[in-house]
Image: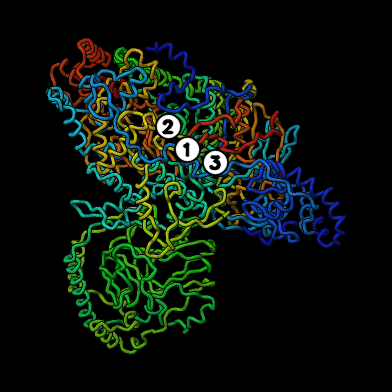
Amino acid sequence: MIDRRRFLTTTAAGFGAIAFDGLLPRIRSADVPLPHYAPKAQSVIFLYMDGGPSAMDTFDPKPRLTKEDGKKFGMKMEPTQFNNNGNTLGSPWKFRRYGESGLEVSDLFPHVGRCADKLAVVRSMYATFSEHTNANYFLHTGHGLQGRPSMGAWVNYGLGSPNDDLPGFVVLDTGLTPPGGLDNFGSAFLSAKFQASVFKNGNHPVANIRPADKRAELQRNKLALVQDLDESMLASMTSAGAIDAAMANYDLAYRMQSAIPELANLDGESDATKTMYGLEHAYEPTRLYGRHCLLARRLVERGVRFIELTCPNVSGDRWDQHGNLKQGHENNARAVDQPIAALLKDLEQRGLLDHTLVVWAGEFGRTPFAQGRNGRDHNPFGFTIWMAGAGIRGGTVYGATDEYGYHAVEGRTTFHDLHATMLHLLGIDHERLTYRFSGRDIRLTDVHGHRIEAILA
Amino acid sequence: MRPSFPLLLCLSTAGFAAAQTGPSPDPAKRLERFESEVRPILANRCFSCHGPEKQRSELRLDHIEHILRGGERGPAIVPGNVEASRLALAIGYTEPALQMPPKQRLPDAERDVLLRWIHDGAPWPDEPVPQAGKRKPKFDLEARKAEHWAWRDLDDAPAPNVPTSQATYNEIDSFLLSKLSSIGLQFAEETDRTTLLRRVTLDTTGLLPTTAERDAFLADTSESAFERVVDRLLASPRFGQHWARHWLDLMRYAESLGHEFDYAIPHAWRYRDYVVRALNADVPYDQLVREHIAGDLLEEPRRHPEHGFNESMIGTAHWWFSEQTHSPVDVRQHTSDRNANQIDVITKSFLGLTVACARCHDHKFDAISTKDYYALSGFLKSSRYLQRDVAAPRDPQLVDAAHRAGGALAQAWRTRMRRAADSIDAEALRKAFDKHRLRATPERSDRDFSPNAKTFVDFRDANFDDWFVEGRAFGDGPTEDQTFVAGEQGTALIDGRWANSAAAGARAQGVLHSPSFDIDQPFLHVYAQGQRARINIVVEGFQVIRNPIYGRLKQTINSPLPRWYTVDLRMWQGRRASLLVCDQEPRDFGSGGSPRDSFVAVQRIVFSDTERAPPPPRDVPTEAFDDIGVAVDRAIDAWGAGILAPSQVRLLNVLWAEKLIEPGIAVEDAAARFAQANDRIPGPMFVPAIADGDGDDHAVYIRGGHRNEGDIVPRRFLTALGGEEPAPHRREDGSGRRRLAEETVDNPFASRVIVNRLWHHVFGRGIVPTVDNFGVLGQPPSHPELLDWLARRFIDDGWSIKRALRRMLVSRAYRSTSAASAGAVELDPENVHLHRASVRRMTSESVRDVILQLSTRLDDKLEGPAVPTHLTRHMTGRGRPRSGPLDGHGRRSLYLSVTRNFLSPFLLAFDTPLPADTRGRRDVTNVPAQALALLNDPFVIAEAKRWAEATREIQDHAERVVAIFERAMTRRPSPSEERRLVEFVRSQAETHGCGIDDVKPWADLCHALINAKEFLYIR
């Protein structure tokens, strides 16, 4: 019989405890040690911009749209979701150049603009899905349908987590669950230990994390009894890996009960920090998002591999302005701009930005022509994302859309390429991170994906 | 795909425009230019994928012959014709589906060079054609079939002889022992009877044995005591409840469509109950498979023995458990994805083959071609989703009684109208006619309407012919006489020669659906009359008919008088579609349906290129304005005599619709009797089922691309399993699924795959461990002879699942202890050879069900709509349904709602699979969420308390501790354990600061036991 304590310490799988999968085929080829090469990044913070922010209103200026505002649109229109296409719609916002790089950012993002020299902006994204749900699955799992593991699950499957008391993949749910639901954060056929733990706002962000017992002693007594019973069971068994692992799991769950409330308690943060993140902001969505940006930093400090933030619920809608673009985008930007800038600065000040990759992306962009009078419909043919932090060359622009910002035409890039780049920075060769399922060796990048070399430092 | 004409408009660069108009240089010059400008571009930009090494899309561009022959999509260029050249389209970067080079468009200068070269006739020097480079190995179906074990026929080797000294209970043991002894092992000793009883009860029913059952088994010293236990358990209705869940895992059973709004699949739960009933009744497996493929087409459908409804039809519901998108921009892509999932599920489940891997290319490893895949797709293209009524045939006497009551009501109206006719206000009548546009319409003829209009159907001179009739409502053709309809939705007459859903009585429901058609005109007009009924246009089989895009494909029919309804089809021109006239409660996916007494009638359907509908009929009953009394009298006479003119029908309908005549007491009494008579007829029983449409073969989608159609493939089964092209198609053959059903069970995979699944659940590991994949990438069988022997016995036994299970459960192998004997761990670390039993965790459903069983809350009622799953605050998102009770009303987990985006987190934590695809083998994970759920979930806490309260009447503390312990663990605690438990209760009471008879310390004891591994694991 294996000594349980020893078993725990020698199996450095971290949070996930030990899979009871002697029945399953080997999940990773034993001869591929991970990481494949020295990583730049240890953690990823993914700022998910739900609904699809408009590129030509944020990071991809298009003077021609302004010039032809209100005129008939000058290119062939692809089918759109609502098919209520209007005329060319110029951006209601001005763009300014920021920093040494002179990167152009619209007035929706003045705070982020001041971090311009940290950003690598990719203006030539394209995707093949026009609906939120498929596009979200594609962004999160590399596949447009339900049932594939989320990128955070892949990262933890590949690298494990250095923190024994917290999950390796955390979604900070600020209010809006993306279309497609929790499967955007799932582990699908990978072990369930790699799926995201979804943290809500508040002091008890995880389901069942608050001990049911009124006093700690009551729970400890119970666990002591459970342990006695389990050990007498173990004594009668010869092959008890499963039981051992299940027992170790209780140790971890027990520790999580205190680690997670400790994480969520911001009493130790200075007032200056809290103010910088917007925790005192007049606008409630800013406060909520600010709190989660701060939690993201705290998770990075604790070694959590992959952190995703969802958007807060602003009045109106997610970044999905089929109508009323001006007000909707302003509300959404107001909620996230200051907290994101604070996160970048705070990470840098604490020396964490060097090994943290920050990604800002929505599932697609928006049309350069109006939907109705003042909205924009979905546009998967050309849109913008940006990255900052570990291994990223700041102040760069990569790729381009056409003059209208409709189609990506130079340096065309897909989410597969984003995934390949992200894995590369984590020290993983995306072609070698595979899982045999349903008769195929499946990858996050399917059979696609190239690193975006031009934005790497 | 044809390049679109606007191409040139987009290529607006000056350079090319100049080249077009400039003089063409002489041939030598052109060749020189080719070498200096064109070939370098092709070599730099194209050859790496379309050259001697690789031929993506089977295209190479390193010689004009190859270029002209082209690739999968056809010739790459048409010399001299830029617009018709695919290469020009690709480098033009205007067509999202075809853009080359894939990463980045060419610099304008290079693009212009290539376009000019095509324009100039694509000159190429006279040089030898480069030979084929590295060739991919040819897909050789026959060779693959010959090389892989699973395609072979079942072996009929008898069980091996083993020395009589070895304990065997049946042939299974002989096969296993023969292998075991070859590696120097034998069975571990038999486990103790208490452990065995707990194991077999959990494995068969998913619940624990009671203490009384344990005592009875321990007291039965006869040799066949265990066999009797097995027989009792297999006969228990709880058997079906437990094993149905294994089956539902294969069928990715779900009650909603997922995606953005998670629309309901109405009545999906009836399928879950069907599976439970079928397993409990031990319906032969081959029959079940037939029912799944073509239960709607069986000559003698299986009927429920008591209620008489059509069971076989319900088996087809699984076709519609695929995830479906809300408002897909590309409907054909959506249908193609759905078909892939449908084919994946049936072929993995029933054949253990990954046929859907052949969607984009011939299977990489197995003897399955892309043509095989699209041959199967044709069956789906030829079939339709419908909510179908499976209720038992109606009692003709009840129907007749309702019919007579309807006649009496009509008579009462005639009497009433005759009396009241003179009191009708002529001015009000005039207004009513105006309102219904019956009077003021200028006369127009159909010819004025649109010269290009095309009549799709006109039931005045057509019967149902190539239309499909679903349910009872529409009878078997347009009614010859007028039909009188009355009920909660109002009173009306339907003229003769209309297709009408009141043909078979007031409450009958049904759908009339059209032959498939290609949408070749932008507007469709339907001349219809009805109340709360619907017309759906189903495009490419898509039936989530919702806004923002698809909402316009439905028309609610709600007019007491006939009028034209217009459907705007501009978005779907060129698509294949069908039209559904629906008078039944579930009208598409999602919720919402028609109330009682709805009806619909359709006379004509016309396509046109104008949005304006055809003119309404001209025969306005003008005499009504001269003398309303006379006009009504005449109409009543004509009605009684059955010779109503259309104008008279209209007059009466206006009177009813505008309530110009009050019914009066006699009519109200007759109406009440009519309603009562209808109430006595049992209503319909709907199920999401499949129905035949027109036989339509499917084209190969080259490399899986739905915009890239290749050859049409006739519908047939897999080539390697003898699927042959059928005789020329006749309409009466329908989709051909009936034959597919036979072929699906008539092959060596069918029986092997199912006995292997049973084995997997009994022993914890399949003989083929990859239970859903018997292909090359699956794992080979550990005991091939045993697998074939089991399969043969299974067939000989009439495909009986229960008998096959019994054989496994009573074997010596099943009764071994889970402890390994000395040396066995080294010789067989993964216990492949079953020298001992494997330790397994309870399934997620069992964990929850057993907690309910312990707490006495369990309600093991069979059947019925799902209990809504309890939603925690962590479960958010669009389409959030209402939350259910924390304890699910005590129902077994099988009956909790399976709403795709809101699955039970408790069950998910313990590895209930997502309903995405076939899952014959669940993951077994070990995550903190499991420990946290059992430690802190309010459900667990509440049931632990309930359990403690249920033991309150046991006064003696030690007795109470023992009773609680043995209920959970089946065994009695050892004396030292007993002392420890009593001590726990005492000290926990102290910590709580309460008396020992308070429920709190006892609830803590119950709670702790639920967290013990001995409770969770099956030994």
Let me know if residue B643 appears in the view: yes
Say which quadrant the C terminus of chain A sits in: top right
Q: Percent position (x, y) of residue B62?
A: 73, 47
Q: Are marks 3 and 2 in contact (CB under 8 Å)?
A: no
Q: What separation in Å lies between label 3 and label 1 (alpha carbons)?
A: 37 Å
Secondary element at image label 2: loop
Residue at position x 19%, y 37% from top? B235
Mark number displayed over residue B780: 2
Secondary element at image label 1: helix
Residue highlighted by disc 3 = A138
Q: Percent position (x, y) of residue B439?
A: 41, 82
**Considering depth in this image, is A222 or B691 the residue closer to the camera?**
B691
Q: Would you call the spot at circle 1 few (<14 residues within 10 Å), some (14-19), or many (20 or more)?
A: few
Image coloring type = rainbow
Secondary element at image label 3: helix
Q: What separation in Å lies between label 2 and label 1 (alpha carbons)?
A: 13 Å
Let me know if residue A179 appears in the view: no
Q: Would you call the spot at circle 2 few (<14 residues within 10 Å), some (14-19), or many (20 or more)?
A: some
Residue at position x 37%, y 82% from top? B430
Q: Percent position (x, y) of residue A418?
A: 62, 36
Residue highlighted by disc 1 = B147
Q: Amino acid under label 3? A: Phe
